[in-house]
Amino acid sequence: DGGITQSPKYLFRKEGQNVTLSCEQNLNHDAMYWYRQDPGQGLRLIYYSQIVNDFQKGDIAEGYSVSREKKESFPLTVTSAQKNPTAFYLCASSDQVGRTLAEAFFGQGTRLTVV
Amino acid sequence: RKEVEQDPGPFNVPEGATVAFNCTYSNSASQSFFWYRQDCRKEPKLLMSVYSSGNEDGRFTAQLNRASQYISLLIRDSKLSDSATYLCVVITGGFKTIFGAGTRLFVKA
């Protein structure tokens, strides 16, 4: 079955550590996105990529980094520079970016907690 | 002003009630509009797209008002299973996808 997979589901990070969240899709979608969701707030865009080897900052990119070496994969690294990383992270993918309306498919999310 | 704004609620309604949510957007060049449903601690899932002419899917009706720059979602004959957070999504010209903060709905027996 086609879909988008995030791992791990739960992640605990110590202060000062970098951690990487995995996102893989087999939908053959060109575009992939990372969002962050805090309690009572909507999804905020961290980074997005429209094509392999290219990515753009979203609204809250500081303290995060990404790579897009393969079409299927878009890992997100939460660096020690991110001052408040505890949140629910959602990865999404979509097709037909910039041309027509594009439904986004989401992974099941990674809940990151700083301990 | 936020690019997309929703009333956070919560809306508490009895089963069988009709409830409506609005979502306003600030960019008049916005091209595509959607409603997503998000259950607690789960990922958002597409509920329905919103077309200029309005569209209906069973008990759900979505409307777009470009002149006043808002979209709406109407739920008729509410069910307990409709309890969730409803997110409006706006795609502006080119690419940018913007999510609203969501409106929480609780349907009570």
Image (cartoon, coloured by chain):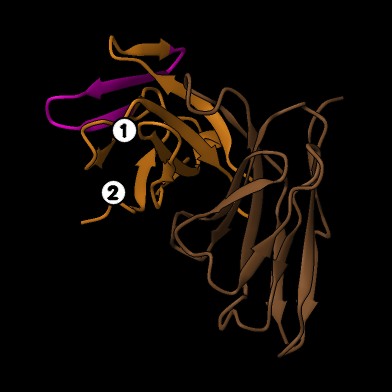
Name the quadrant containing residue B78.
top left
Residue B3 marker: 2
Which color is chain B depicted in?
A: orange
> Which residue is at the front of the view, A34 or B39?
A34
Whole-percent x, y for residue A115 in the image = 73, 87
Q: Where residue B81 appears, x then y in whole percent?
A: 56, 35
Chain depicted in brown? A
Q: Position of residue A59 (x, y in %)?
A: 44, 59
Residue found 43% across the figure and 17% down from its top: B59
Q: Which residue is mark 1?
A: B19
Q: Nearer the viewer, mark 2 or mark 1?
A: 2
Residue lying at 36% horizontally and 47% vertically, measured from the top left = B12
Q: Amino acid at mark 1?
A: Val
Sooner in the amino-acid sequence: mark 2 or mark 1: 2
Please give the range of residues in magenta.
B57-73
Task: Tell me the residue at 43%/29% (across/down).
Answer: B34
Asked if residue A29 lies in the magenta stretch, the reply is: no
Quarter the N terminus of chain B occupies: bottom left
Q: Amino acid at mark 2?
A: Glu
